Image: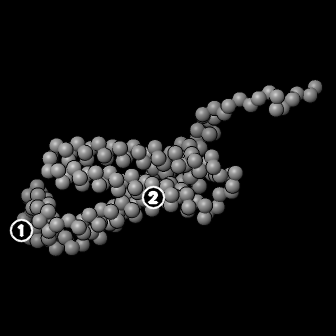
């Protein structure tokens, strides 16, 4: 087994972050495809299903990445798996936030105006409030980028915190049980 150092931890986090980000961006693009179809039912169903897949998938992937780190390198501690998860969340959040920002930047003006009309209609905004929302639209890509990146980082940090403890508590209490060793390897000399 090789020793875990900061460079190796960043490399492992980059691989995990890229994979998490690719899964999240894939779910985002599938939701966008469902939105283009024009069917409200398809959009809602795709949103619910893809959100569930993304949410549960990230939990299972985080567990697998942390277990792989623990099993692959020597001297891995709970703090190391937590750092791996936090760094992977930071990097995957960067990918997802960039993809969402790009989608907003490429959104046609007619679609953006339709979205704004739906938003102001559902919130019953006054004329002055509607103007304030319209003034905010040029900053929407930056706001989306920062808020999505922050959300992914915080979600990943909390998940990494719970998951790193879970993995090491399993090891502490002997779950899963270690396979029995052969009696022939350690002869009893009495």
Residue at figure coordinates x 87%, y 29% from the top left:
187
Q: Can residue 147 be seen in this view?
A: no
Image quadrant where one finds the C terminus: top right
Q: Position of residue 129 (x, y in %)?
A: 11, 68
Horizontal and vertical percent for residue 50? 31, 46
Residue indicated by mark 1: 127
Residue 184 seen from this side: yes
Which residue extends farthest left?
127
In this rendering, the answer to whether 188 lies above or below 170 is above
Q: Residue at the location (54% across, 54% down)?
A: 82
Whole-Å distance between the Cαs marked 2 and 1? 44 Å
Residue drawn at (53%, 49%), measured in percent from left and top?
A: 65
- Position of 178 compared to 41: left or right? right
Residue 95 position within the rendered picture, expressed as x and y whole percent measured from the top left: 39, 62
Quarter location, residue 153: bottom left
Q: Please state which of the two labelled residues, at mark 2 or mark 1, is closer to the viewer.
A: 2
Density class for disc 2 (Cα within 10 Å; few <14, some 14-19, many ≥20) is many
Label 2, secondary structure: give it.
helix
Q: Are marks 2 and 1 in contact (CB under 8 Å)?
A: no
Neighbour tally class for label 1: few under 14, some 14-19, many 20 plus, Cα within 10 Å: few
Q: Which residue is denoted by mark 2 in the rendering?
A: 18
Give residue 69's mark. Answer: none
**Number of numbered tags placed on the structure image:** 2
- What residue appears at the point 43 percent right and 54 percent down from the top-left corner? 20
Vertical order, 102 against 57 (above or below): below
Frontmost residue, 134 versus 128 = 134
Depth order, front residue of 103/52: 103
């Amino acid at each position: 087994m090789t020793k875990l150092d900061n460079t190796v931890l960043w490399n492992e986090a980059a691989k995990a972050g890229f994979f998490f980000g690719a899964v999240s961006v894939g779910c985002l693009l599938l939701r966008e495809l469902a939105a283009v179809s024009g069917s409200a039912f398809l959009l809602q169903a795709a949103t619910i299903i893809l959100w569930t897949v993304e949410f549960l998938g990230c939990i299972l992937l985080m567990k697998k990445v942390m277990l792989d780190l623990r099993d692959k390198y020597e001297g891995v501690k709970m703090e190391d798996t937590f750092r791996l998860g936090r760094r992977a969340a930071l990097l995957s959040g960067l990918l997802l936030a960039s993809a969402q920002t790009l989608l907003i930047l490429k959104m046609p003006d007619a679609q953006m105006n339709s979205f704004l009309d739906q938003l102001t209609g559902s919130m019953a905004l006054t004329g002055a409030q509607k103007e304030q929302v319209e003034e905010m639209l040029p900053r929407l890509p930056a706001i989306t980028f920062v808020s999505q990146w922050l959300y992914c980082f915080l979600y990943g940090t909390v998940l990494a915190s719970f998951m790193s403890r879970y993995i090491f508590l399993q090891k502490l209490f002997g779950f899963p049980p270690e396979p029995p060793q052969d009696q022939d390897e350690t002869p009893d000399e009495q």
